[in-house]
Amino acid sequence: MKIIERSMQIKNQDKKQGLIEVIPESIDDLWHLSHIVEENVFVSTLTTRRIQDNDSGKTRADRGVKKTFFLGIRVEKISFHKYTGMLRFTGVIESGPEDLIPLGSHHTINVQINSSIKIQKTWNKWSLDRLQQAVDSSKRPTEIIIAIEDNTADLGIIKQYGIDYIGPIIGDISGKRNIAKDRQEKINNYYEEITKTIRQFDKINKLIIIGPGFTKNGYYNYLEEHHSDLAKKSILESTGSGGHAGIQEVLKNGLIESLSKDAKIASEISSVNKLLEQIGKSSNLVTYGVKQVSMATNMGATEKLLVLDTFVREKETQNIMNTVENMGGTVEIISSEHDAGKQLESLGSIASFLRYPI
């Protein structure tokens, strides 16, 4: 079965009311929405509830009847779980049929893939840019990192929010000292199992085959012989380790960014690495932490702002972001789902590259 990524649809826009209706079509889309929607934003969607039918004399009346209607809440809490693909908005009900629901009570909207949701808020440049990112993201072909060792392989699918890990894929291969007669056949079966997993994905741009030993070369040779179309898209890269650690290693070395300039995670990791490099040099052209970044921004010194995605909802953060953009600077949102995001979090979740020392 092919895994085909579809793009977020913008169904309707009313700029005067600040109302945009969208249809998320992937987990990436749900992740984007979890940061576009903030506390105190109004969201509405079609919902189905079982309403008690007290007037019915039917024997199953105690179960009620299903009714579908629009329900809107003022958001108080946002939760996104990438592993379950679940996005929830919880808040106070502000709109809906008063005869069916109690206005002012709390309700949770479970945002579903392929179901529309209306968002009403003050849209600034960075939130509109993020929405457009979600629309454009599925048009970008997929990069897959294959961390392969003697009999274990892990795949890292590069997503907008970070890395989606698949595996481990285990090969039934005997040790080198105990070479079975059918060892090569088992190796080929192992390689084919990896390939079948890769083939599930649509629009593959690059395969980055990594590992500390020579198994990656053997797998590449297998692709050349049996799957030449994938071999043409493959690049070999030596790493100090395999598994998740090897995938993180290749993400940090800039290879992904050089292969695909619009790979979001590669750009984010590169930006944080440049920041850490400047901090390591005690450069006066970077600063971090809310107080220092706010001061630099108000002086017009911030050229590029890095903000952790979980920090975007803070009012003070949004003020800094808007000021940076109004003064001609750029804002990059860093995902908290990868190591670079965790490094930025340790620096106060916000940092800036400066136009001049302050």
Image (spheres, rainbow, N blue to C red):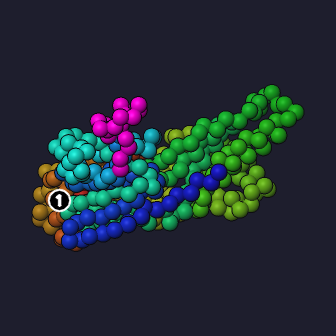
Task: Classify 10 Å Cα crowding around label 1: few (below 14), some (14-19), many (20 and above).
Answer: many
Q: x and y percent of residue 66 in the render?
A: 38, 43
Task: Residue 185: name its quadrant.
Answer: top right
Residue 62 or residue 117, whichever sits in front: 62
Identify the residue at image location x=82%, y=40%.
184
Q: x and y percent of residue 87 in the render?
A: 36, 45
Q: Is residue 133 left or right of residue 90?
A: right
Task: Residue 235: name its quadrant.
Answer: bottom right
Can you say whether 294 is above or below 187 in the image? below
Helix, strand or loop under label 1: helix
Q: Is 229 part of what is drawn in magenta?
A: no
What residue is pinned by disc 1?
320
Q: Return the residue found at the far front.
A: 57
Q: Return the residue found at the far top.
A: 178
Q: Is residue 196 left or right of residue 127?
A: right
Please name the amino acid that badge 1 sits on. Ile
Q: Which residues are magenta?
A: 51-68
Can you say whether 54 is above or below 22 in the image? above
Can you say whether 23 is above or below 84 in the image? below
Can you say whether 52 is above or below 196 in the image? above
Q: x and y percent of residue 234 in the render?
A: 65, 58
Q: Is residue 86 visible?
A: yes
Identify the residue at image location x=47%, y=66%.
261
Identify the residue at image location x=78%, y=55%.
226
